[in-house]
Image (spheres, grey):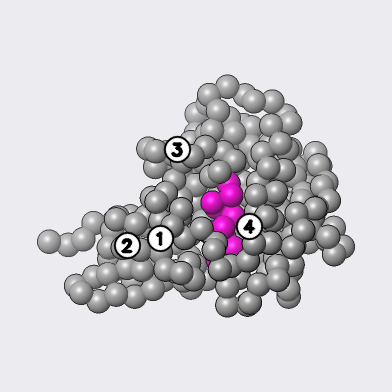
Amino acid sequence: MATDYVVHHLQRVASTQDEARSRFAGTPCLVTAAEQQAGRGRGGARWLNAQRSLAASLAFVPEWPPARIPLLTLVAGLAARRVLDPALALKWPNDVVSPAGDKVAGLLAERTGDLVLMGFGANLYWPEPPAGFGALFEADPGPTAGQVIAADWAHQLLAAVGAGPGNWGRSEYRLCSATIGTTVSWDGGGPALAIDVEANGGLVVEAQGNRQVLRSGQVRSVRTTTLPD
């Protein structure tokens, strides 16, 4: 896949995901917005907006086997971390967190047929964020900062997609994972120790000697918890 793409910088939208879907015309399409009124997170959760935030969506058709498509959320997370700050970590499957564990960015993957819509939201400046959230800058970086970051992210992501799923960055992901080594519970299961991310992107967990692989499309959330004594 070529890394060329068209860009639409908009002031206010309901959802960059919906805008990217409607504007896609065959060439990868990046949509950014200064204000997103109905942004959504994973599982339909509402996305909270920082005082200065990045809202972007990239629409593209990857030439990947269908079984490998779920990897794209992890690949997009790696691309986000590279352009934001290598000190950040990735919380499986779709969050970017600070060294303190606060969420500073998130990814959202949706599909319409062969079309993939990858959303990228980041808190750029947020003087008083809610508990569990943080921001990337201590001072307001200005209205165009999000556009620059989004363009760098799209370039990184499309280059990784073009390279194919064979070398998607598993080793890098494992090194920067905020989930491996923690005890997690998920909707309908747990607690269990997260021990690895396997080649297809699933989270490998273990409890009482039994291992299983969680798939991002099968669970709505993964929460750090405490194993019983």
Asked whether the viewer can see residue 215, the reply is: yes
User: Residue visible at 40% across and 60% down?
Assistant: 222
Q: Residues within 10 Å of mark 1 (few under 14, many from 20)?
A: some
Between discs 3 and 2, the one toward the N terminus: 3
The image quadrant of residue 142 is: top right
Left or right: 103 with respect to 69?
A: left
Q: Alpha carbon of mark 2 to alpha carbon of mark 4: how far?
A: 26 Å
Residue that mark 4 sits on: 160
Give the farthest residue toward the right: 25
29 in the magenta segment: no
Label at residue 222: 1
The image quadrant of residue 40 is: bottom right
Q: Alpha carbon of mark 1 to alpha carbon of mark 4: how far?
A: 26 Å
Residue that mark 3 sits on: 87
Which amino acid lies under the numbered mark 2 shown in the image of this protein?
Ala
Q: Alpha carbon of mark 3 to alpha carbon of mark 1: how far?
A: 22 Å
Secondary structure of residue under mark 3? loop
Residue that mark 2 sits on: 194
